[in-house]
Image: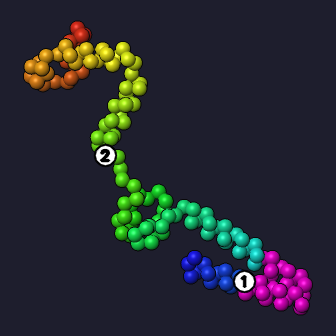
Amino acid sequence: MKNRQIRIFYSMGVVQILGLGALFYNWWIGVAMFAVCACFQIGYATSIVFQNGKMKVCPECRASIPKYNRICPECGHLYQKGVSEEELTGIIEKEKEEQMSSEQIDCDFEKIEEIAVEEMTSFDGDIEALLKKKDGVEI
């Protein structure tokens, strides 16, 4: 807990003790002081819990930062490394393969096999245009 929070809880505790003492003077004032402070403490503690739920503590510098941050703004600690380019390419290719039927995949491989290496290296334009031209479709 931070010093400010400790001071707030301490002062509310003092007011509650005064409320208990006020019970001897006037019963209603004592109960009211005690109940109001108890409600305030519960509400304040609940707000602290919700605020802490949105934060995390950096293991390097112990700074309190928002949970969604991947890098600590205080010390630069990296919480989560990104996906490498090779892994990302693999994920994208796997998703494309899942969306394509086996006939489409076989057709694409046949198109690739039919094209001569010399034709590919000498071609200067769009590869899709070359594949459509090979299928007999004019662009």
Is 47 displayed left or right of 94 in the figure?
right
Q: Residue at x 28, y 18 (%)?
A: 108
Query: Does the magenta-highlighted stretch encompass residue 69?
Result: no
**Mark 1 — residue?**
13
SS under mark 2? loop
The label number, if any, that marks residue 81 in the structure image = none
Of 111 and 16, nearer the camera is: 111
Q: Is residue 39 left or right of residue 113?
A: right
Q: Name the residue: 43% across, 67% down.
A: 59
Please report whichever mark, 2 or 1, sits nearer to the chain's N-terminal start. 1
Question: What kind of residue is marked 1?
Answer: Gly
* Horizontal arrangement in the rendering, residue 39 relative to residue 126 (left or right): right
Q: Which residues are magenta?
A: 14-36
Residue 100 left/right relative to 123: right
| Rendering quarter of residue 96 | top left
- Residue 102 visible? The answer is yes
Q: Quadrant of the C terminus?
A: top left
